[in-house]
Image (cartoon, grey):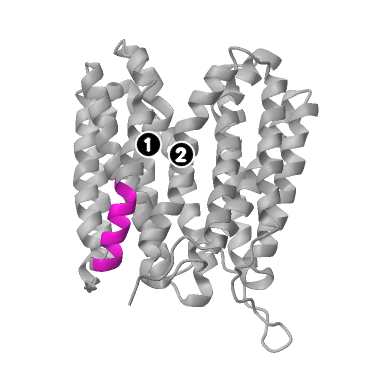
Amino acid sequence: MGKERLWTKDFVIVFIFNFFIMLAMFLLMVTISGYAVDEFNVSTSTAGLVAGIFIVGSLIGRILTGHQLSLLGAKKIMYIGTAMFIVTYGLYFIAGNLPTLLLVRFFNGLANGVATTAVGTIAALALPKSRRGEGISYFSLSFVMATALGPFMVFFLLQHITYQTLFMIVFGLVLIASVFTIFVKTDNTTVDLSKEPKPKFEWIDKNAMPIGVVVLIICMTYSTVLSFISLFAEEQNLVATASYFFLVYASIILITRPVTGRIMDQRGANIVIYPSFAVLALGYLALGQTSSGFMLLLSGVLLGFGYGNFQSITQALCIKVADAKNVGLATSTYFIALDFGLGVGSYILGTLVPTLGYSGLYSSMVVLVVLGIIVYYMVYGRYERRRI
């Protein structure tokens, strides 16, 4: 018997939708701090708040959305999130002062949390269960492609256009993405309130949360890469090479994720995730010892394999361990852990920089990776039964 179909119409639609909204997000994420400084003459710390408050809004959006998926359905939530996207991206044109910009960024993040949680749920439901690990690996590539393309696009564009024109491009991307939502058919099963009582509010899935703790720990380590890699590269006189770091990182993910997702479906998560942990630890060691362009790009290769595959495998695991009716809540739980780790990690771990320096900080991330391995083994790894 042949394999169940992976690239269904709905899966393709949500893949394209996710790519466009993630591209829009990254086009502004990497430039909004500079915009705040240029337009409102704020300090760098305040500019960082302008960028970071988006993550806060996204986190709150995910917390609110997980419970509502079982009441309204993922498709309606996606429509709501898309409408919020259109409104909030439109508000950038009239955000004429810092407080207004902060509010727009917060609600833009809220829209992101709502929409992406719903879309991630639809993507999982559109996949055959026997190929869900492989499918989620493919779906997550929409995010990776946006990660690689967004920063390169925007740095090129801003040499030729104004911020207002950039806002127009981003708004256009969101409008294009919104058209695709019309054709989605897949939805989760919702609670019939006429036949059963309204379920109590839950913002996390209890079965998925143990995996979520592992996600939180490892995402804290990766937050140091997102936040400090440019400063580290400047310190090491590797700014020119650093521009290729995320391209190398994303390329490795594009190559390996479909393979590792297929292996997970066939043989379980352990055979993929333990090597990912090991390679991730090597990546941080290499980054900590970096003093040349070659070492910087090598660390990008190692982090791409380690962290990149860890992300997709743990997302699939959160859905796997949850009850069928809680796929949406499990997806929300995964993203809450991811957002929280990325959001607070750089703030907490950044306090180590004055003592350890950037090289010491990256080398010390091995300790957190080892902690992640231990927690993973305790909550899931030792219980897994491999599937042939």
Q: Position of residue 107 (x, y in %)?
A: 69, 42
Give the farthest residue toward the front.
1
Residue 107 in view: no
Whether residue 298 sits left or right of residue 164 in the image: it is: left
Q: Position of residue 337 (x, y in %)?
A: 45, 52
Which residue sits at x=59%, y=59%?
118
Asked whether 172 falls inside the magenta stretch, the response is no
The answer to whether 369 is drawn above or below residue 356 in the figure is below
The answer to whether 65 is drawn above or below residue 386 in the figure is above
Mark closest to the chain's N terminus, 2 or 1: 2
Which residue is more in the foreground, 297 or 357?
297
Numbered circle sitting on residue 250: 1
Which residue is more in the foreground, 343 or 245?
245
Give the quarter of the image for residue 46.
Answer: top right
Which residue sits at x=19%, y=50%?
275
Which residue sits at x=71%, y=35%?
171
Amino acid marked by disc 1: Ala
Q: Which residue is mark 2?
A: 145
Which residue is more in the foreground, 13 or 227?
13
Total number of numbered labels? 2
Amino acid marked by disc 2: Met
Secondary structure state at the residue bearing disc 1 = helix
Do tag 2 and tag 1 residues touch (Cβ < 8 Å)?
yes
Give the quarter of the image for residue 384.
Answer: bottom left
Q: Position of residue 39 (x, y in %)?
A: 70, 15
Give the farthest residue toward the top.
237
**Chief secondary structure of the magenta span?**
helix
Whether residue 298 sits left or right of residue 352 in the image: it is: left
Say few, some or many: other residues with alpha carbon within 10 Å of mark 2 (under 14 / 14 to 19 / 20 or more). some
Secondary structure state at the residue bearing disc 2 = helix
Whether residue 114 sits left or right of residue 274 in the image: it is: right
Q: Which residues are magenta?
A: 256-266
